Image: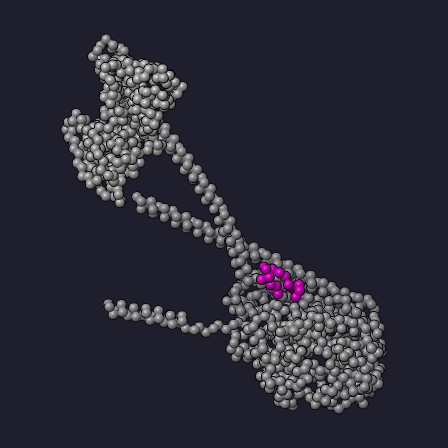
């Protein structure tokens, strides 16, 4: 009986001691629960080793892999793809809500504006020396404001025009079809000849060249056309400077082209997608492209040509696609978002998808060089690249006010001179507004 | 008995709780059902509201696209380019981003000038298959960058021809956001949401954009994966929807909570409206009602309780008042009866005396009985006054040191003569540790005399009465003294023992029959004992005797000298060589006449003043030392006896301070005696006057 009591007492003491030990033992700090919201518009990527072409899929994969190895928090990654026309709904309208983007993957020309909201954080703390030297200075320069890096470049695409060789041949323009894998440039006279010939010889319901003004999509290309008569486009302060003889001449050229039937009938009510449909349907001879969209356009049947310029060398635009990280007031989220971007850049497989354009990373470029579409031609044509944003803030505001003036020009509602003045006034007002409201993240 | 009552209370409480719980449960159950029914009805109404909304949107869109076709037809275009230009303009004025005219071969003609063979496209096939109108979700995803989620509306129209092309219908592409806006209906505090699914369960509008644009989530897959629905269950749902049936289902999503879902098919389409409400909304609604009801019930119950409390208190007060009134009534009734009885005797005896004036023997007998009855009446009145004052709490105990030895000696002397008369053996046994106490000796004596008086009264000849006195220590400086009076009398029945201390209680048994008493003695004793902080109890057995026990706790006192005789009034000392001259102040003529006659008969020289004014005047007018004694009635006209005494004492004459003034009044309370002393009187003679005592006071040397 006594033994039984001793055993019971010993058991109780052990139980209490064990409980105390457990109670006193340092508990593993509970990891914060973090939901990372990564957003992107529809963007094409390419990787010769996989069939994946949708950047959405890559980010989903990257998100899952990142969450699995991230130690500082339990991360759930949500990837949301929005239509370009719904960007405000998904980005600015979601500020201060649980749907706010933590990471944005998009083209710089839209993303640059968000830097001035004060919500985009500098990423210099995650950029190592190796990483900095792996990207060319021009790309870093495009990514910076006041010396701080707010965007991480992933790849760049060079926008040029393209044409249907078949239609050219049908119209007897064989001599203007250059060699395979080259980017051509035509003089203004050649442009006039080609367009007039196409207009004359293409069958009914077919048109020589793209034009649209229904919305802001593809407005960069129309802006590039405004340089065709020698306009510098921006003044030395980076403000719109179209209301010049050269700018007005370019607008006049556009108006004349429409009158001459060089553009699709009713193009003032069309959008870039409509021109894409006409081009695919062989109803449009000259359209725009880059290495990402060329995949869908049967590049073998196309020739590539720069936008017209007064000197005949032609213009192209180049835009960078990359990452931005937003500070939504949650330190754990911000830390995870930065870690995600860093994880992405450290992953060769993920970086290889930049081969859809010219990868920002030199190392990646070297790795996937053989798979980069027309790498040599695009590299050689880089000398004709023009800056189409001048790193101005509120570029979305600029885009909102630009296309209605082109619509007015095409609809014949206003003269080229009036349109030039209106573009300068409204676009510069948007830029001034952007600077006035500019707030950089501390 | 007590346990039975306790059990009864517990049973009542438990029964009340059970009934209350059952009522509450039944109420909440009914409330839940009612709320659930109400929410379900509301869900149905919402679904029908959504349905009308969507139907309106669809009909407007179909009408609009059909109107474009009609206007294009009536514009009499001669070329396809003109048709396309017409559509280009139309596109700028309606909700459609893209409008296609469709020819009989499935080619499409758009406002963007595109002419395409779209006969393989689902929306063209649907139109060509003969559907008069349709709507479907169609996502353009051929080119990633131009991915677009559309709603495609199609209307089959009357054919018309342009440039050899026969148009048979029209389709319009609208942004899916338009109908999404229509579905943004705030219900149940934004917890309920409306979706549209097609026949395959695909969301027409993705509620959750996680999947990204161009990727359609499937509702049935969500049910299968989230709510574990079997294929059979899903088939049942699709069958019912195909049969155009509206219904409500409950799906359990496990940890993600349960959902109540309303399905309503949309006419003229393959779509259905799905209104989903989390189950917690139902619970919340019920909880809300329950909380409100509980608060309301609590308020009602509280109010009722307060009202009940008020009523109970009022009833209790009223009952006490009634009981007091009844007690007063009973007391008065008893008193009336008790007083009338001896009065009746006196009146009767007076009548008999008048009838027998010539018969001295009978007259003597009647006079003796009349005297005895009058004395009884006097004691009765005294007891009633005592009782009345005790019940009103107006009796103040006169606490002063006294000796128990002296008390017992007094008691013995009073009792002894009576016991000897009845040949009863009377014995006092005392064991006193501290005989000197502080207390009201007179009242203690009154209690003991009462008890002993009863004992003598009810103990038969040859019986035995023992007074035992013993003490026990109480708190510091105090001692408890217990007096036990045990007799071998007739005893008291158990029933009467319960009410022996009630006023006017007398047992009417064969043994006690004929024993006259007021019935107030025990009651007065009991009240006095209580006022002293003591107890008075009785134990008795009928036919064997009784034992009364009176216990009191008192402060200890220093040794008290024993005084042999203690009287209130100082006897008068007069010169013996002349008649004592007495001035009587009495307003009542009869009383004055009796008193004058008594004193004359006794040999005193008597003068009479009829009121308080006259007595002062007569004294003032008298020569010095003319009056030896003033018998002063207290309640008189002009001025009362106290005032008159004060004035006389205040007079500037040699005998003002020395003349003996006795208060002669029916007010016999201690306070009256004190008041008499304060006004300068020398003594107190109570009315009715005890002649023997009066003579003693007037004749004994001072």
Q: Is residue B399 above or below residue A325?
A: above
Residue at position x 76%, y 76% in the image: A239
Residue B486: name its quadrant.
top left
Q: Is residue B649 left or right of residue B271?
A: left
* Front residue of this view, candidates A231 and A207: A231
Can residue B344 be seen? no
The magenta region covers B180-195
Foreground pick, A160 / A247: A247
Front residue (pair A70, A138): A138
Q: Is residue A92 visible?
A: yes
Q: Position of residue A20 (x, y in %)?
A: 38, 70
Q: Position of residue A136 (x, y in %)?
A: 66, 86
Residue at 77% of width from left, 76% of height from top?
A: A240
Q: Position of residue B166 (x, y in %)?
A: 78, 72
Indicate left or right for A105 with A398 as reference.
left
Count numbered badges in the picture: 0
Q: Is residue B533 in the magenta section?
A: no
Q: Which residue is located at x 58 percent, y 66 percent?
A: B239
Q: Quadrant of residue B378?
A: top left
Residue lying at 61% horizontally and 78% vertically, measured from the top left: A123
Point out the image quarter for the N terminus of chain B: top left
Which x, y percent locates residue B126? 69, 71
Instruction: Using residue A103 as the reference point, say whether residue B668 is left or right of it.
Output: left
- Residue closest to the eye, B369 or A396: B369
């Amino acid at each position: 009986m006594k033994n039984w009591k001793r055993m019971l007492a010993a058991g109780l003491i052990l139980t209490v001691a064990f409980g105390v030990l457990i109670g006193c033992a340092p508990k593993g700090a509970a990891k914060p629960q973090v939901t990372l919201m990564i957003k992107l518009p529809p963007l094409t990527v390419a990787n010769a080793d996989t069939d994946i072409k949708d950047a959405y899929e890559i980010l989903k994969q990257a998100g899952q892999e990142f969450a699995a190895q991230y130690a500082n928090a339990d991360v759930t990654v949500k990837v949301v793809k929005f239509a370009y026309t719904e960007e405000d709904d998904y980005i600015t309208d979601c500020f201060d809500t649980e749907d706010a983007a933590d990471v944005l993957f998009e083209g710089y020309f839209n993303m640059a504006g968000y830097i001035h909201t004060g919500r985009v954080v500098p990423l210099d703390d995650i950029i190592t020396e190796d990483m900095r030297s792996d990207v060319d200075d021009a790309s870093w320069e495009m990514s910076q404001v006041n010396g701080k890096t707010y965007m991480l470049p992933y790849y760049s695409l060079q926008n040029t025009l393209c044409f249907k060789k078949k239609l050219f041949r049908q119209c007897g323009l064989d001599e203007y079809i250059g060699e395979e894998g080259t980017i051509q440039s035509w003089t203004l006279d050649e442009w006039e000849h080609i367009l007039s010939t196409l207009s004359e010889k293409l069958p009914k319901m077919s048109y020589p060249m793209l034009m649209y003004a229904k919305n802001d999509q593809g407005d960069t290309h129309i802006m590039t056309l405004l340089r065709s008569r020698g306009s510098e486009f921006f003044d030395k302060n980076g403000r719109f400077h179209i209301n010049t003889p050269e700018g007005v001449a370019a607008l006049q050229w556009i108006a004349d082209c429409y009158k001459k039937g060089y553009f699709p009938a009713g193009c003032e009510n069309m959008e870039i997608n409509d021109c894409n449909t006409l081009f695919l349907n062989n109803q449009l001879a000259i359209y725009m492209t880059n290495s990402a969209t060329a995949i869908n356009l049967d590049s073998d049947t196309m020739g590539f040509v720069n936008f017209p310029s007064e000197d005949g060398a032609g213009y192209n635009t180049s835009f960078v696609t990359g990452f931005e990280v937003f500070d939504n007031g949650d330190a754990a989220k911000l830390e995870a978002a930065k870690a995600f971007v860093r994880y992405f850049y450290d992953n060769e497989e993920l970086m290889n998808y930049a081969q859809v354009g010219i990868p920002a990373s030199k190392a990646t470029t070297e790795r996937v060089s053989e798979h980069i579409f027309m790498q040599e031609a695009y590299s050689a044509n880089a000398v004709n690249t023009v800056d189409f944003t001048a790193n101005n803030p509120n570029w979305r505001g600029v885009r909102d006010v630009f296309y209605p003036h082109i619509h007015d020009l095409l609809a014949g509602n206003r003269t080229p001179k009036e349109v030039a003045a209106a573009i300068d006034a409204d676009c510069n007002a948007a830029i001034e507004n952007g600077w006035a409201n500019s707030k950089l993240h501390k | 008995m007590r346990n039975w009552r306790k059990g009864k209370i517990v049973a009542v409480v438990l029964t009340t709780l059970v009934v209350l719980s059952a009522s509450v449960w039944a109420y909440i159950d009914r409330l839940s059902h009612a709320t659930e029914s109400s929410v379900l009805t509301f869900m149905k109404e919402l679904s029908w509201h959504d349905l009308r909304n969507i139907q309106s949107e669809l009909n407007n869109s179909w009408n609009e696209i059909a109107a474009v076709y009609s206007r294009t037809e009536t514009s009499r275009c001669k070329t396809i380019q003109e048709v396309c230009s017409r559509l280009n303009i139309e596109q700028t004025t309606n909700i459609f981003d893209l409008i296609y005219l469709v020819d009989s071969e499935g080619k499409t003609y758009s406002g963007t000038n595109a002419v395409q063979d779209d006969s393989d496209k689902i929306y063209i096939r649907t139109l060509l298959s003969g559907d008069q109108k349709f709507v479907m979700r169609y996502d353009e995803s051929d080119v990633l960058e131009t991915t677009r989620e559309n709603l495609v509306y199609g209307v089959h129209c009357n054919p018309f021809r342009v440039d050899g092309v026969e148009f048979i219908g029209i389709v319009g592409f609208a942004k899916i956001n338009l109908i999404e806006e229509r579905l943004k209906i705030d219900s149940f505090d934004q917890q309920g949401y409306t979706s549209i699914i097609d026949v395959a369960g695909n969301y027409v509008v993705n509620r959750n954009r996680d999947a990204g644009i161009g990727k359609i989530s499937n509702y049935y897959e969500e049910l299968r994966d989230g709510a574990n629905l079997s294929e059979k269950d899903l088939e049942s749902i699709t069958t019912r929807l195909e049969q155009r049936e509206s219904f409500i289902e409950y799906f359990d999503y496990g940890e993600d909570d349960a959902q109540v879902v309303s399905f309503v098919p949309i006419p003229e389409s393959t779509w259905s409206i799905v209104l989903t409400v989390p189950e917690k909304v139902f619970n919340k609604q019920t909880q809300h009602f329950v909380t409100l009801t509980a608060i309301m019930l609590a308020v009602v119950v509280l109010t009722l309780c307060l009202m009940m409390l008020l009523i109970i208190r009022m009833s209790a007060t009223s009952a006490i008042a009634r009981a007091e009134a009844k007690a007063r009534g009973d007391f008065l009734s008893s008193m009336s009866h008790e007083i009338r009885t001896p009065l009746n005797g006196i009146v009767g005896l007076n009548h008999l005396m008048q009838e027998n004036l010539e018969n001295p023997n009978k007259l003597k007998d009647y006079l003796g009985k009349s005297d005895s009855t009058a004395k009884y009446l006097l004691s009765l009145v005294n007891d009633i006054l005592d009782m009345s004052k005790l019940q009103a709490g107006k009796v103040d105990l006169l606490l002063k040191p006294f000796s128990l030895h002296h008390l017992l000696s007094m008691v013995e002397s009073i009792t002894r003569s009576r016991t000897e008369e009845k040949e009863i053996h009377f014995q006092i046994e005392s064991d006193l540790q501290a005989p000197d106490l502080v207390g009201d000796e007179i009242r203690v004596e009154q209690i003991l005399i009462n008890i002993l008086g009863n004992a003598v009264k009810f103990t038969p000849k040859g019986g035995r009465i023992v007074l035992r006195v013993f003490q026990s220590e109480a708190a510091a400086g105090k001692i408890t003294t217990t007096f036990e009076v045990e007799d071998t009398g007739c005893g008291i029945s158990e029933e009467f023992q319960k009410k022996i201390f009630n006023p006017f209680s007398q047992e009417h048994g064969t043994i006690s029959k004929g024993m006259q008493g007021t019935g107030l003695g025990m009651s007065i004793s009991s009240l006095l004992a209580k006022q002293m902080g003591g107890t008075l109890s009785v134990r008795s057995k009928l036919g064997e005797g009784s034992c009364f026990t009176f216990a009191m706790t008192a402060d200890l006192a220093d040794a008290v000298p024993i005084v042999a005789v203690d009287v209130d009034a100082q006897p008068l000392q007069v010169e013996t060589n002349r008649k004592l001259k007495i001035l009587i102040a009495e307003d009542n003529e009869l009383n004055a006449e009796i008193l004058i006659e008594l004193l004359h008969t006794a040999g005193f020289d008597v003068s009479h003043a009829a009121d308080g004014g006259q007595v002062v005047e007569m004294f003032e007018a008298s020569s010095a030392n003319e009056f030896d004694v003033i018998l002063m009635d207290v309640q008189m006209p002009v001025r009362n006896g106290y005032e008159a005494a004060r004035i006389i004492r205040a007079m500037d004459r040699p005998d003002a301070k020395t003349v003996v003034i006795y208060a002669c009044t029916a007010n016999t309370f201690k306070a009256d005696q004190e008041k008499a002393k304060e006004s300068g009187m020398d003594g107190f003679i109570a009315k009715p006057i005890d002649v023997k005592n009066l003579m003693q006071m007037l004749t004994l040397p001072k």
